Image: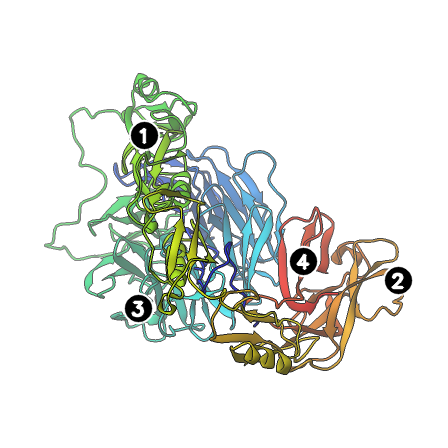
Amino acid sequence: MIGRGRTGSTVLVGTLLAGVLAASFGVGYSATTPELNDGTNHVPHGHGISQVNSETQRVENEARALATGKEEIEVVELQDGRAAAVNNRTGEVRVYPRDLGTDSTVTPPQAGKDKPVPPGEQPAVVAGKDSGYVVDPTGNTVRQLGVDGPAPPPVQIDGGASRTAVPDGAGGIWVLTDDEKAVHVVRDRIVHRVTAPDPIRQLSVADGRPVGITSKGEALDIAARPLRAIASRPVPSGPSVVVGSPRGAGRYLLVLDRKDGRLFAVDPRTRAVHDIGTLPTDSPNSLGAPVILDDRAYIPQYAPRKHRLFVRELPSGTPHDDVPVPGEHERFTLEVRDHRVWANDQFDRRVVVVGRDGRPAVIDKGDRPGVQSDTTQGEHKDQAPPKDTPPSTVPPPPTTAPPPSTEATDPPPSRVTVPEIARGTQQDVACDRVRAVGLRCDIVEVGPGGPTGTVRDTKPLGGSRVPEGSVVRVFVYGPVSVPSVVNLLSDAACAKILSGAGEPGAGGQLKCVKEPMPGTGRTWSDLDVVAEQNPAAGTRVELDTTVTIRFWNTVLMENLAGRNGESECQRVIASSRNRVTCTMQLSSGRHTPDQAGQVASQSPPPGSPVGIGGSIVLDVYGASPPPSVPPMVGTEINAACQAASNAGYTCDARADVPLSNTPNVVLSQEPPPGTPQQGGNVILHYSNNQGAGLQPLYRFRAANNDPVWIVRLGNAPVEGYANPVHIGWAYNAAVGGTWTINDFYCTGKPSNCGGFERNHYYTKNDQPVIPNFDKHYAVGAFIQAPDGQCAPGQRRMYRFKYHANDGRRYFIGEGRPDGWPDDYEEWLGCIWAP
């Protein structure tokens, strides 16, 4: 790669190094944070769904039957409080309101009583931050739920959609494809497609990031660009491995190998892989996907009549008491909701809930159709009790029904309707309305987003039916926290204030005004540095509050007389971070030979203020101006080295450009031409390899002006295409430092080809990646640039893709066509500019 010449705004003696700030995709990415909750959850219960309150240990609402017989139901609670249910036998998906009233069918049944949906092909529901998504492996689509207005159209997943998907912490989800890649879906489109070095076999969430585990056991942060390894060594991978459930994700990535029951925890912050140990089970194949609550892992065992949760401290692996799980059926569900672990057997009467203190509570869901056992009672509804049982001296366990009593009992509490509270209502008014119907009001501050003290929403939602005396949580907006910006540069300080970076709850709701300090800074490094801020860091303020920052705008000029002019210019520019320029000129004053290079006089004079953007001029003693580096770009390398030597410099010739259309010619030099420098090295970058077969590259468009393009070496006529445009120069065969670019075209029906008979696209991959597309031939070879930077005289070439309503579009060029949305692109490499 050709080295870039150093630039500056001054005629500077010496060389300055510029700092480079590297940014990567995904900074600030976080997983969905659960809302404060009232301790309720929707769980499968027999043939239907029940809303269970873990605080009152009562069932608050029930939904009508969704299943018959032993059909398993999978329930996911969405962020707005609604419940989405999947019948895993028929593939039917329904969405229920929070109070489990009238449901709506999202996906009709896909199979009948005698033909269930094959395992792994049932739809899956994933709860995102603002809505939910239905992943349909049968149709290979992803559809969004819970949006205002008409639902967006489903997204077709090329490569096939599996049931494995995790939330992205914002408005979308990540889906593992059947061809072992991962795609990022947001609303109605794919925004990113991940191809790892090896096939991705598992998908999970750890420390708020989506993590894929490859076939070689490499754990990768798939949202990072480039992909980032989160583990210092490989972890188990393969069909016997399960990873932590996204319905109970935490800081660590949990990896469980069911061959031997061994559990590992990966800390993405340190990349440490902790061996938690082997779980004490005689049937490791019955272990399931674990969840995390705080710093404890809960690992389910589904062995018949041995339902339990193994509990391990993270990352030490210290064991805690096992938690028995009511039920004796094939499986139970496990999730973390509202800082509680919920383990529920759909066909048992009981559910166990574990709090943050690690203590389990067994809650009676009650009897209803489909409930087949009551583990706590020890009675099974599908079995007759044994006859002639001998008397027992052990007292029977307590039952849920109280003993008969002649005393009057209190009637069950009446149910009331939670009032509708409009967004923006003052909190006092909202609480008055809640109390007016016999409910209790609990104010919960949720940070910025609206005027302080006004309502965002309530939980339960307005219109819900709840027992009289229940607590309604009223979520209100709170003030903004001012971040600390003293000692930052002024632009960076304002950016932090506007974005809310570094302060929980800041939210980017502030304004920034810059003012210079009234005095002067002490040194050049004080320039543009914030010295004061008002309000102070940590102050809680209202939305749109203006934060005023004061920075050092001037410093006092030093007395540089008698010092080395070149060194002083470099020091001033570097210390001021290029806020001040410095130039030198030859002094005409009398001087002795040993004063050559020293400062004779200066402008401005010592003690004068110098501000940001100011300029310093130094008069330097010398018989003549110091020599400057001659221009050598475009010169044959040997001639250039000779010219450098003749001028008193040492030639450092570097053949570090892989390919060039002008080999053995200087392409760039350091320092740049004209830089004042007395002797020393001059670095010359060139290429000694032109490669073979450099030819002109043309782009054609379909003759009927359809949006279909092809590229070819040379402009020979191509049937069905016209208007060739010369876009650059490429190689007709792969040589060192190039990528072979392959042409694929659609062979399917026009409905599968973007609406056209043929729709070409180009890729570095040597196999088709889209169904109905076949390889045509290798177009040519484009130049590699591993660091992503093309050499001078080269152009970056991409393949762009756009999903239109009637199909796909493909285009090849340096830039995306006007009007095309940012859908997908593949960088193909560099070509020589025309």
Q: Label 1 belongs to which residue? A: 541
Q: Horizontally, is 370 left or right of 761 in the view?
A: left
For the residue pair 58 and 574, the one nearer the viewer reads as 574
**Between discs 2 and 4, the one toward the N terminus:** 2
Q: Label 2 belongs to which residue? A: 720
Q: Disc 3 on helix, strand or loop?
A: strand
Q: Residue furthest left?
A: 393
Q: Horizontally, is 805 left or right of 530 in the view?
A: right
**Between discs 3 and 1, the one toward the N terminus:** 3
Q: Label 3 belongs to which residue? A: 272
Residue type for callout 1: Val
Q: Residue at x 31, y 19 (%)?
A: 428
Measured in 3D between alpha carbons, the distance from the residue under mark 1 to the one under mark 2, in whole angstroms, is: 66 Å
Image depth: mark 3 or mark 1 in front: 1
Measured in 3D between alpha carbons, the distance from the residue under mark 3 to the one under mark 1, in whole angstroms, is: 40 Å
Q: Position of residue 738 (x, y in %)?
A: 64, 76
Measured in 3D between alpha carbons, the distance from the residue under mark 4 to the one under mark 1, in whole angstroms, is: 46 Å
Question: Is 450 placed above or below 265 here?
Answer: above
Measured in 3D between alpha carbons, the distance from the residue under mark 2 to the one under mark 3, in whole angstroms, is: 58 Å
Q: Which mark is residue 800?
A: 4
Q: Disc 4 on helix, strand or loop?
A: strand
